[in-house]
Image (cartoon, grey):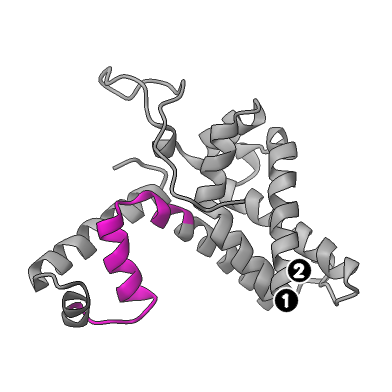
Amino acid sequence: MSDERLERPIVALPAMPGGLGPRRLADASDEEVLTLLASGSELAFRTIWQRYGAAVFSLCLRRLSDRGAAEDATQEAFTNIWKRAATFNPDRGSAAGWLFAVSRNAAAQEARHHRRDAVPVAVLDQSQAADEEEAVTRLAVHAALTRIPATERAVLELAYFDDLSHSQIADRLSLPLGTVKTRIRSGLLRLQQYLEGARP
């Protein structure tokens, strides 16, 4: 699968409030995208891949400690996401939680295939359960980051993943310091809105 950046296609989603016409698929919630995926939408599948592909691979790599096995598990996870999208029930949890469960199961299956030790879900202790919850949060944050403008995403990634100061980011990107601060503020606000299920 390719993680190429996709255009923001317009599909048959409900109109935005105020009669603003059809919404773009990239602006749809994860729950809406999974509903479209359940009807066989290839664009919905590509959108889920764009939002979660890298995060699912990272999760599988952490669990398997082998790049080839992680790639196989990621492919299996997305095959299962495609086949089982209709089983997602938003009343039972978030889309990120469901995607994590499918991905975790694919990684566990790959571990069994390679005779690695897989942790049965039934024997997770409290600290492991907390790790599972953190992983779901990471998946949701990663997906939200893919949905904000590239200019805002770049400064947020440098600030929070590379631990650079505002001044260092300004130097790295050759931007005025005020621009960096503005982009971080607006990016964080947009990120929060996506994580809360709102749309900026």
User: How far is disc 1 from disc 2 in space, using C-alphas?
Assistant: 5 Å
Q: Is residue 148 visible?
A: yes
Question: In the visual, does 200 lie left or right of 84?
Answer: left
Q: Residues within 10 Å of mark 1 (few under 14, many from 20)?
A: few
Helix, strand or loop at label 1? It is loop
Residue labelled with disc 2? 69
Q: CB atoms at circles 1 and 2 under 8 Å apart?
A: yes
**Rendered position, 109 above or below 30:** below
Q: Which residue: 52% across, 64% down? A: 138
Does the magenta-highlighted stretch encompass residue 158? yes
Does the magenta-highlighted stretch encompass residue 41? no
**Rendered position, 63 above or below 6:** below
The amino acid on which the numbered mark 2 sits, given as a three-letter code, is Ala
Question: In the visual, does 185 lie left or right of 17?
Answer: left
Between residues 41 and 1, which one lies in front from this camera angle? Answer: 1
Q: Quadrant of residue 46?
A: top right
Helix, strand or loop at label 2? It is helix
- The image quadrant where one finds the C terminus is top left
Q: Which residues are magenta?
A: 143-166
Give the percent coordinates (x, y) of residue 166.
19, 77
**Dominant secondary structure of the magenta stretch?**
helix
**Rendered position, 146 above or below 170:** above
